[in-house]
């Protein structure tokens, strides 16, 4: 993000050669870097400081696309089910 400085640290990992080759092919095909790929994955891990979602809610997480307009979806449910 332009104008946003993030503090970074170096990290040494031990990963087998085949996995490294596969990862390098993946990042080349997707126009990213291995550092960015790993950082995005690690950032997506659950945050243990927040309370866990109830299992029923956790199963629904991510069902709607991120661009979904919540108010529009509520209106749809109201029209369809009278909720």
Image (spheres, rainbow, N blue to C red):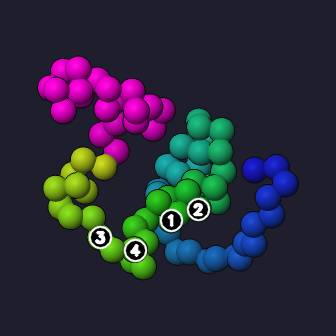
**Residue 39 image label:** 2
Observer-nearest residue: 29 or 43? 43
Q: In which quarter of the image is residue 69?
A: top left
Q: What element carries label 4?
A: loop
49 vs 17, left or right, is left
- Please report whichever mark, 3 or 2, sits nearer to the chain's N-terminal start: 2
- In reply to whether residue 63 is colored magenta, the answer given is yes
Tell me the distance, in whole angstroms, between the alpha carbons under discs 2 and 1: 5 Å
Q: Name the residue under label 1.
A: 42
Question: Is the Cβ of the residue at disc 2 closer than 8 Å to that at disc 1?
Answer: yes
Residue positioned 33% across, 74% down in the render: 51
In the rendered structure, find residue 50 and report the number of the disc placed on it: 4
Is 28 placed above or below 36 here? above
For discs 3 and 2, the disc positioned in front in the rendered view: 3
Task: Please tell me whether residue 73 belongs to the stretch shown in magenta.
Answer: yes
Distance in Å between CA atoms under marks 1 and 4: 16 Å
Q: Distance between the residues labelled 2 and 4?
A: 20 Å
Span shown in magenta: 62-83
Q: Position of residue 46 (x, y in %)?
A: 40, 67
Q: Disc 1 or 4, which lies upstream in sequence? A: 1
At 59% from the left and 49% from the top, the residue drawn is: 24
């Amino acid at each position: 993000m332009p104008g946003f400085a993030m503090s970074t640290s170096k990290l040494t990992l031990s990963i087998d050669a085949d996995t490294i080759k596969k990862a390098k092919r993946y990042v080349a095909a997707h126009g990213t870097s291995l550092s960015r790929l790993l950082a995005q994955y690690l950032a997506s891990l659950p945050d243990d400081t927040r309370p866990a979602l109830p299992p029923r809610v956790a199963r629904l997480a991510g069902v709607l696309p991120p661009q979904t307009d919540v108010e529009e979806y509520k209106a749809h449910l109201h029209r369809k089910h009278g909720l």
